[in-house]
Amino acid sequence: MKAITSLTALVLGASLAGMALAQTETAPEAAEGDMVLANGQDMTPVEEMDGRWRNAEGIPTFNVEDGVVDFATFNGFRRYHAECHVCHGPDGEGSTYAPALKNSVLRMDYYDFMQVVASGKQGTNSVMPAFGTNKNVWCYIDDIYVYLLAHGTDTIGRGRPAERADKSEDYTAQEDSCMSS
């Protein structure tokens, strides 16, 4: 993984440590191989940890059952539209000066996505600012990621998801911990 700022590493480390201590729940009827991305990553939800669904490798993913999105995916929609859509367009569809993130997350490694969001990226005609110290982004980066995955795989369509699961106590505890640190 590329070098990231020490604050970002600290926040990421605290988040991962919290996940290790959190209770887990097994995904209903989840079968590995259900959802393999273009980058080869299997994003099939296997367990719920800290109120967020994870694949077999512990990478955040989404879980949609009977049209009901998990809370983290729903919250990712909200956070994306609060912080990211100005440049990357509604629903991650892209704009004239920023890429379509709903497509980028299908090709990028999760850790590369985290690196770009945390440290930013400069190109010839574009500048992605660093968001590693912005708690409104960083505390919800996994939610934004899974929302973009769900939309990029056409599991959910454009716009606000119609139905969502409730916010769990584990999710609330993790959110409170991140926002107060």
Image: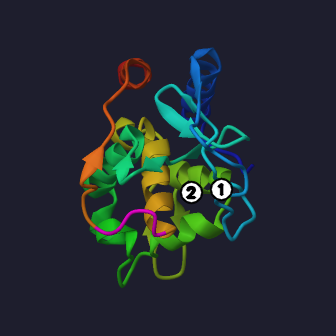
| Distance from the alpha carbon under mark 2 to that under mark 1 | 6 Å
The answer to which image quadrant residue 84 occupies is: bottom left
Q: Position of residue 63 (x, y in %)?
A: 49, 46
| SS at mark 2 in the image | helix
Inspect the image, locate mark 1, and give the three-letter code of the amino acid beneath it.
Asp
Disc 1 crowd rating (10 Å Cα; few below 14, some 14-19, many 20+) is few
- State which quarter of the image contains the C terminus: top left
Work out whether 169 lies above or below 140: above
Q: Where is residue 51 in the image (x, y as percent from the top left)?
A: 46, 29
The answer to which image quadrant residue 97 occupies is: bottom left
Query: In the figure, is residue 97 to the left or right of 78?
Result: right
Query: In the figure, is residue 122 to the left or right of 133?
Result: right
Q: What stretch is highlighted in magenta?
A: 154-158
Disc 2 crowd rating (10 Å Cα; few below 14, some 14-19, many 20+) is some
Badge number at residue 116 = 2
Work out whether 35 lies above or below 92: above
Residue found at x 42% / y 54%? 147
Inspect the image, locate mark 2, and give the three-letter code of the amino acid beneath it.
Val
| SS at mark 1 in the image | helix
Q: Where is residue 163 in the image (x, y as percent from the top left)?
A: 27, 48
Residue found at x 36% / y 25%? 179
Query: In the figure, is residue 120 to the left or right of 5?
Result: left
Work out whether 103 lies above or below 74: below
Q: Residue 9 or 52: which is nearer the viewer?
A: 52
Instruction: Considering the whole magenta stretch, tell me its main secondary structure.
Output: loop
Q: Residue 38 or 130: which is nearer the viewer?
A: 38
- Tell me if residue 119 is in the magenta stretch: no
Q: Where is residue 60 in the image (x, y as percent from the top left)?
A: 57, 43
* Residue holding disc 1: 112
The answer to which image quadrant residue 28 occupies is: top right
CB atoms at circles 2 and 1 under 8 Å apart? yes
Colour treatment of the image: rainbow
